[in-house]
Image (cartoon, helix red, strand yellow):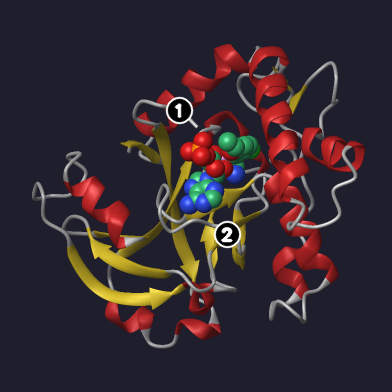
Amino acid sequence: EALGPQEYTALKMEVSQWGERAGDIASKVAGKKVFFIAATLRPETMYGQTNCFVGPSIEYGLFQINDSEVYLCTERAARNMAFQGITKERGQVSKIVSVKGEELLGTKIKAPNGYHPEVYILPMQSVLATKGTGVVTSVPSDSPDDYINLMELRKKAAYYKIEPEWASLDPFPVLSTPSYGDMTAEFLVKKLRIQSPKDAVPLAEAKDLAYKEGFYSGTMVFGPYKGQSVQDAKPKVRDQMIADGLAFAYAE
Ligand code: A2H
């Protein structure tokens, strides 16, 4: 955990198709663009998104951010955004409707920079309501948490009340490291014999190893910065996504 403020890249993932469980939400935001906002520390990995996670029991809101855009995130995050110049009126949040994470499962969203252009919303128990936006985009090639949760959902789709199709996109290689190859998360999950998302201690170790090796020794194997070091590519990808309106800076 960083001691000072954490600077995230907030990814704008536009809803392309609400799932059946979202009820009449679509009618409440008719004519507006709605974006799931996912906070990430690894913008250079976004080529490898396969899905996006929400906490099934977390309460989210749809917030009117400006005249045409609605953001889906926790109220806590919306309030932070309002004091970071992200909303039209400083300090003001305007909630259109509340929604529980489980109602969002199966909704389809666009994945900015993704090799897979659209991904589904899936459940992850370990999403914290108190960090970031409460929305976590999933990159199972490079995040051990994302990898083990995706595999768990594939194994027990019925138990988690999801359609197998929603978890069917495969991890996609984004960067390579000398120690772990181009599927860092899968390599470490196997090496540390992690069986399920409940193996918290080895998962934390895998997360640490993956982050350090990727950042200090990784080379991009996909996208416009292919062949460049992760350290060089990371700020370039971030700046480009922000310039293109696909993301914005968010701190907390
Ligand atoms: B990262 P830090 Cl490829 N609850 O993005 C749980 N996890 C959350 C969260 C929340 N409310 N909000 C953000 N996160 C995740 C990509 C990624 C991330 C990769 C590899 C490692 C990694 C794709 N998921 O994070 O506690 C988000 O996942 C490992 C550190 O603020 C975000 O970046 O340091 C990261 O945790 C922020 O964690």
Cβ of disc 1 within 8 Å of ligand 1?
Answer: yes
Q: Amino acid at mark 1?
A: Ala
**Residue 100 drawn at (x, y percent):** 44, 76
Residue 13 visible in image: yes
Residue hosting label 2: 53
Would residue 90 appear left or right of 100 to someone viewing this image? left
Location of residue 107 (image quadrant):
bottom right
In the rendered image, the residue lying farthest to the front is 201
The residue under the point 38% across, 68% down is 60
Q: Quadrant of ligand 1?
A: top right
Residue hosting label 1: 2
In the image shown, does 146 or 2 lie closer to the viewer? 2
Location of residue 97 (image quadrant):
bottom left
Would residue 94 appear left or right of 172 to someone viewing this image? left
In the image, is residue 126 above or below residue 31? above
In the image, is residue 3 above or below residue 27? above
The residue under the point 84% across, 42% down is 189
**Residue 190 drawn at (x, y percent):** 90, 42
Q: Secondary structure at mark 1?
A: loop
